[in-house]
């Protein structure tokens, strides 16, 4: 079964750079040793640029610049309102060029242009949100009448190491950059090596907005080289990482030597549980969007759909028919709903799971490359039914447009299936029974739960997972907590009795 609804053109943006450099201490620079790596576009899989490949020496320079800017520069000492004004100017600049950002992001990642535009606009909103939040930040005060006043002094921690993924790179970079800068930290950003293009735009955006030199530094490179050096650097007290779980485990081990603060949003295999009393039309719309938007390359994808048996056959038939009608093709075409996967390595991984799935479930839609698209990293939206909970496509994160559907008979069975994987990032519950909805939501092993909805974020709420899906939370004041130290200051208002050791 192959996808037949395709768009076959290939759009290439004008004025693409042929080289992508680091940004350290306010200057664009090459790697100290001259190392580079090739950057491909996912539609042609041809090299369109070379990027500087950061090594230990480049990370050392970036961290030194960030440390100097933190120790001696104005940024950590600005009033919150002054930092907020800069962040709003950053948001203005992002909004002013959102079409160009989306164009470059789509070319670099293969994301459909309409979805990339939404991600660019969300990046601007992230900066506005944290600009407002830092001005509204209040420190706690505790009073012991007549004896003591105690207050909390928030202090930016220092140099923050930010390591970001390739699936929605610009937006997810903003998710870390905005609270780190709002808090008064300086940063070293290591973007994903597959998708360095949009990250290269931050440097001019920040410089134009008035971010002092050294506050923002960017080092491109391979995770095992630049990323590893950043994680291990003794002058970087914080690491915020978004990526897959095995990499997160390595980072966890490497942070231990210096007892670094860590925030890690890792992989997911999130369930969507559809009960017989659900609004079936809405559930189908939402679960299709939840796994096939962003090309299925999303950590919160509802890639396991658990359906009550009395509606199972109807759900599967309708879901498969819709999946087979999804428009796959050139990411720059506004009609495209699923574009090209980010890189040939990832394409090969996803296709290997498609082949595994053919031995583990009943193929209802997709299952290969779409007709009419002989080149590029295209995968037809693929639907497997009757998938056992022991199957690899049920247990393992695929991170592509592939979904497994499994029936259940009772609420208890549904809960066991939902919790029966190592991940615990998100869950989606579809039922009109509010008692069941709340009880199920509170029992499911997931950091985030949506009732009768797909992933619709409120930036004030915590974002993060449990089990193998992460460590810590981001979002709202949780992000500010991560990038600041809370120092307790105690003030005595009356004489304090102190035992006189050694006195007579």
Image (spheres, grey):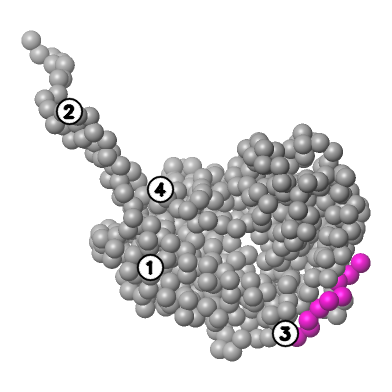
- Residue 255 - label: none
Q: Residues within 10 Å of mark 4 (few under 14, many from 20)?
A: some
Give the number of the mark in front: 3 or 1: 1
Q: Earlier in the sequence, mark 4 or mark 1?
A: 1
Can residue 242 be seen by looking at this rendering? yes
Q: Is residue 430 left or right of residue 196?
A: right
Reading the image, the residue beneath label 2 is: 147
- In the image, is 394 to the left or to the right of 74? right
Residue 306 x, y percent position in the rendering? 79, 47
Residue 317 lies, in percent from the top left, at: 89, 58
Q: Looking at the figure, which quarter contains the C terminus? A: top left
Report the side of 376 relative to 209 (left or right).
right
Q: Is residue 202 left or right of residue 267?
A: left
- Dot 3 and dot 2 residues touching (CB under 8 Å): no
Label 2 or label 1, whichever lies nearer to me, is 2
**CA gap, disc 3 to disc 4?**
44 Å
What residue sits right under mark 3 in the picture? 10
Q: Nearer the viewer, mark 3 or mark 4?
A: 4
> Which is nearer the N-term, disc 3 or disc 1?
3
In the image, what residue occupies the spot 67% across and 44% down?
423
Q: Which residue is mark 1?
A: 87
**Residue 26 location, quadrant:** bottom left
Contact, mark 3 vs mark 4 (Cβ under 8 Å):
no
Magenta residues (range)? 1-9
């Amino acid at each position: 079964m192959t996808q037949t609804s395709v768009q076959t053109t290939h759009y290439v943006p004008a004025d693409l750079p042929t080289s992508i450099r680091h940004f350290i201490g306010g200057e664009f620079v090459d790697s100290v040793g001259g190392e580079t790596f090739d950057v491909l576009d996912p539609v042609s899989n041809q090299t369109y640029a070379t990027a500087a490949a950061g090594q230990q020496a480049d990370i050392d320079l970036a961290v030194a610049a960030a440390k100097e800017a933190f120790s001696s520069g104005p940024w950590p000492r600005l009033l919150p309102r002054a930092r907020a004004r800069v962040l709003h100017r950053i948001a203005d600049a992002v909004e002013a060029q959102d079409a160009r950002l989306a164009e470059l992001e789509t070319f670099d990642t293969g994301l459909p242009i309409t979805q990339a535009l939404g991600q660019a606009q969300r990046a601007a909103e992230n900066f506005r949100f944290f600009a407002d939040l830092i001005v509204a930040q209040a420190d706690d005060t505790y009073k012991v009448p007549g004896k003591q006043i105690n207050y909390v002094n928030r202090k930016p921690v220092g140099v923050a190491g930010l390591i970001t993924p390739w699936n929605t790179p610009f937006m997810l970079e903003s998710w870390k950059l905005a609270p780190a800068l709002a808090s008064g930290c300086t940063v070293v950003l290591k973007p994903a090596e597959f998708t360095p293009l949009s990250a290269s735009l931050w440097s001019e955006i920040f410089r134009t907005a008035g971010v002092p030199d050294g506050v923002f530094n960017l080092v491109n490179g391979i995770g095992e080289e630049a990323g590893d050096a950043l994680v291990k650097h003794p002058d970087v007290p914080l690491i915020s990482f978004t990526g897959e779980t095995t990499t997160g485990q390595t980072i966890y081990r490497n942070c231990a030597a210096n007892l670094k603060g860590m925030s890690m949003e890792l992989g997911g295999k999130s369930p969507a549980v559809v009960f017989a009393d659900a609004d079936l039309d809405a559930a189908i719309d939402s679960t299709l969007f939840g796994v096939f938007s962003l090309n299925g390359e999303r950590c919160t994808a509802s890639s396991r759909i658990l359906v009550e048996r009395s509606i199972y056959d109807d759900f599967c038939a309708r879901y498969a028919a819709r999946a087979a009608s999804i428009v796959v093709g050139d990411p720059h075409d506004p009609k495209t709903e699923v574009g090209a996967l980010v890189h040939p390595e990832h394409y090969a991984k996803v296709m290997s799971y498609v082949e595994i799935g053919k031995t583990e479930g009943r193929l209802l839609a997709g299952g290969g490359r779409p007709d009419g698209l002989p080149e590029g990293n295209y995968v037809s939206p693929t639907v497997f039914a009757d998938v056992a909970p022991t199957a690899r496509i049920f247990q393992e994160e695929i991170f592509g447009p592939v979904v497994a559907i499994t029936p259940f008979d009772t609420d208890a069975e549904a809960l066991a299936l939902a919790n029966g994987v190592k991940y615990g990032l998100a869950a989606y519950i579809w039922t009109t029974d509010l008692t069941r909805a709340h009880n199920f939501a509170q029992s499911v092993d997931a950091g985030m739960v949506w009732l009768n909805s797909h992933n619709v974020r409120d930036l004030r709420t915590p974002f993060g997972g449990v089990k193998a899906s992460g460590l810590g939370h981001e979002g709202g004041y949780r992000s500010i907590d991560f990038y600041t130290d809370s120092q307790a200051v105690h003030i005595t208002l009356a004489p304090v009795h102190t035992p006189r050791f050694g006195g007579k």
